[in-house]
Image (cartoon, grey):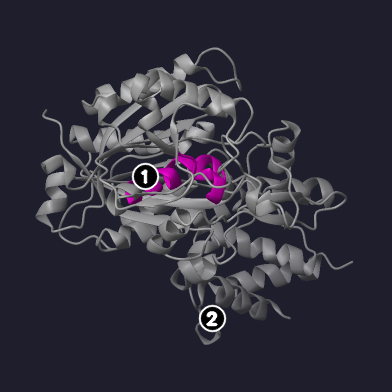
Amino acid sequence: MDSLGLIREFLKDRLGVEPDRVTLEAPLAALGVDSLMMLELMFEFEDRFGIKLATDLQTPKTVGEMIALMDGLIASQKP
Amino acid sequence: MSQRRVAITGLGLISPYGGDLADYFDRLLAGESAVRYLLTDDLPRPLSIPFVSCPGFDPDTVLGKPLASMMDRFAQLGMAAAFAAWDDAGLTRSAGEESRDSWGCAWGTALGGTLAYEKGYRELWQKGRERLSPLAVILGMNNAANAHISIQLGLGGVSMSHTVACASSAIAIGEAFRRVRSGEATVMVTGGSDVPQAYGVARAWEALRVMAPGDANSSPSACRPFAADRRGLVLGEGGAALILEDWDHATARGARIHGELVGYGTSCDHTHLVRPEVAGQLRALQATLDDAGLSADDIDYVNAHGTATAEGDPVEVGALRALFGERAAQVPVSATKSMHGHLLGAAGAIEAISTVLALREQAIPPTAHLAGNLDPACEGVDHVLEGRSGLRLRTALSNSFAFGGSNAVLAFRAADAGNA
């Protein structure tokens, strides 16, 4: 599963958000992601992709920003 | 400020029996036990105990997954019970034109989000994880249930939790009662919830040697308050909620009134952590009568704390004998824990509901498994051995006596008795 797929699956499971609403331009807040759920979502990336998140990681505002951030970490932390 | 009368306009219960309130009370009247044998898959030593659970409760269905996923099971049970009581009171989920700024919530829980903490410990110490879920704090905090209830129902007044072991929700109800009676709050959501099936919690209770043993065959009759062969208490999970409302507010909106809460008294034995005292319990009982402006002769029924422990039962009967004097042998007493188990922080609330239903239905549920089996040390009151109906009940007490010597008693009156 890629990063977009993970976000879509998470938001469908937790908030019932239909996957077609989860576009790259969509603001995460508009999809119902608050500060707590943002952390949950980031930790889901940690668990699924085996990456480590820094404690001072910037907070993405859109789905596209989150994917770029996570894909960057996945690429840089590949063994 | 003059004191207000306090109407009970909503009752909500996540019942181990799985049915509605009428079904719940019918089963109590029939003496039907909800206690079952619990065998877990915990390794290396599974829990193997009589227990009361709510297997029909699906939080995702009742609350919706987005809300349910923000809660530990104790808060889920509490939220669901509060919603049920709220709907029963005929109140709308969303606020209309009337301000709810003085409406509040007082909730009881002995254990809070223990299951969330226990899950965290397993993650850290068994699985070697370096971090926990970002929800761990808000799932585990003891005030999670009342916080969610206040948020979901738009209650802008006090939102507080009470942790007083087995008296937690009785004290929550009493403190909510005082706020409505004083006029500080118009409506209060109150009650309690707990989930004692947490592995560490159940093992801790086991270590105290107060848990009744049982297997698949014997578990339904494992909890035998006041019985000569009693072996101890049976823990259970659950959530129970009441809506307390300013009487005039309730009647003005045409609400159905289940009963009236008329008195609340507390005391501390101040002698021992786990050995109860007649004198301390008697002070709470008398304080309740004084608070309600009642005499002992006015009481038609007592829902006992009655946990089925060797220490507790004779002391409670001793306190009731001291309170009622020569009339004690004529005062009906029953311990419904014999059927619904000991819900710890929800115990006072489920027993308050049982007492209100007894007054509403003019019927008294029994202490199950007691017929022909009474401990001579518990003689001296009218133990209810089988359900009684067609009675004339006006006023009843519900006792909650906790470890730590904290005692709380609530006095209820039938809805129509106050106007008689």
Q: Which mark is residue B355?
A: 1
Give the total of numbered labels: 2
Q: Which residue is mark 2?
A: A22
Task: Identify which amino acid the numbered label 2 is placed on.
Answer: Val
Q: Quadrant of residue B376?
A: top right
For numbered disc 1, what is the local secondary structure?
A: helix
Q: Is residue B184 visible?
A: no
The amino acid at mark 1 is: Thr
The chain under label 2 reads A
Co-location on one chain, circles 2 and 1? no
User: Can you say whether B148 is above or below B1 in the image?
Assistant: below
Extent of the magenta region: B334-357
Image coords of residue B26 (percent x, y): 42, 60
Check the picture and name the quadrant holding the N terminus of chain B: top left
Residue B15 or residue B419, whichever sits in front: B419
B117 relative to B267 in the view: left or right: right
**Numbered label attached to residue A62:** none
Quadrant showing the C terminus of chain B: top left
Residue B255 painted magenta? no
> Toward which corner of the image does residue B29 lie, by quadrant?
bottom left
Binning the other alpha carbons within 10 Å of mark 1 as few (below 14), some (14 to 19) or many (20 upward) gives many
CA distance for labels 2 and 1? 52 Å
As drawn, B188 above or below B26: above
Which SS class for mark 2? Answer: loop
Q: Residue furthest bottom?
A: A20
Q: Neighbour class for label 2 at 10 Å: few (<14), some, many (≥20)? A: many
State the residue at coordinates (78%, 47%): B124
Foreground of the two, B353 or A61 = B353
Q: Is residue B80 left or right of residue B34?
A: left
Above or below B171: residue B141: below
What residue lies at 42% left-to-right and 22% top-to-bottom?
B321
Residue at horizontal 57 percent and vertical 62 percent from the top = A38
